[in-house]
């Protein structure tokens, strides 16, 4: 730091020397004025060196330690945030696996429900088929019975008509007597 301080001091001395030389004009260079200026600058530099530089050094040392502390705190926060990120990423992976297992379970439940509904529908279709066969059988029997009854009624009607037209009173009395004799034999 001393080397840079002396370089700055030399630069200022040269700069201050040139100003009075040009300002003097034709009168030439005033060594006394230059000496006073140099002495004034030296006193100013000594005051700065004595009071300002230690305060500046303290300020910059304090600022450096604050910055280092803030950087250390930021590094710790960064590491903490990184750990938190990894924890959340692990949770996210766990949630993804859990979501997939829930989706698989819902799919399996849907498949089981579909199979149950299909089986119930097949049972209902079979029951409806059996019921339809029973109804068809019953309706067929009813229809056959109705046709038989109608055929019997027709046959009886035709037989009655034929009998009444071809049967005489003697034939009727002979038939009645034959029936009565058969009934007696049965008793």
Image (cartoon, rainbow, N blue to C red):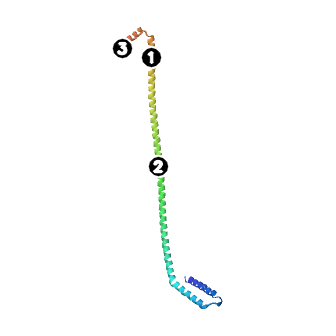
Local secondary structure at mark 3: helix
Nearest the camera: 52 or 140? Answer: 52
Determine which residue is flagged by label 2. Answer: 106
Q: Residues within 10 Å of mark 3 (few under 14, many from 20)?
A: few
Horizontal and vertical percent position of residue 58: 49, 79
Local secondary structure at mark 2: helix
Measure how far apart labels 1 and 3 are at the Cα level. Answer: 25 Å
Local secondary structure at mark 1: helix
Placement of 72 over or under 127, stated as above or below = below
Determine which residue is flagged by label 3. Answer: 183
Horizontal and vertical percent position of residue 115: 47, 43
Q: Assign the N terminus to one quadrant of the image.
A: bottom right
1 vs 3, front mark? 1
Instruction: State the residue lying farthest toward the top.
Output: 170
Determine which residue is flagged by label 1. Answer: 157
Horizontal and vertical percent position of residue 102: 46, 52
User: Do the numbered discs 1 and 3 sit on residues whose CB atoms are within 8 Å?
Assistant: no
Instruction: State the residue lying farthest toward the left.
Output: 187
Instruction: State the residue lying farthest toward the bottom.
Output: 32
Placement of 163 over or under 61, stated as above or below = above
The quarter of the displayed image where residue 157 is located: top left
């Amino acid at each position: 730091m001393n080397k840079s301080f002396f370089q700055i001091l030399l630069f200022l001395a040269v700069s201050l020397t040139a100003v009075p030389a040009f300002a003097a004009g034709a009168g030439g260079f005033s060594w006394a004025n230059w000496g006073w200026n140099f002495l004034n600058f030296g006193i100013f530099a000594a005051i700065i060196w004595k009071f300002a530089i230690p305060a500046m050094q303290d300020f910059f040392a304090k600022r450096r330690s604050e910055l280092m502390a803030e950087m250390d705190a930021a590094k710790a926060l960064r590491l903490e945030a990184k750990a938190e990120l990894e924890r959340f990423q692990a949770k996210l992976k766990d949630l993804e696996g859990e979501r997939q297992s829930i989706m698989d379970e819902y799919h399996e439940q849907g498949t089981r429900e579909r199979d149950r509904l299909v089986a119930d529908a097949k049972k209902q279709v079979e029951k409806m088929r059996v019921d339809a066969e029973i109804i068809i059988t019953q309706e067929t029997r009813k229809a056959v019975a109705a046709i038989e009854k109608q055929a019997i009624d027709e046959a009886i009607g035709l037989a009655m008509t034929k009998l009444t037209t071809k049967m005489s009173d003697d034939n009727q009395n002979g038939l009645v007597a034959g029936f009565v004799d058969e009934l007696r034999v049965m008793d």
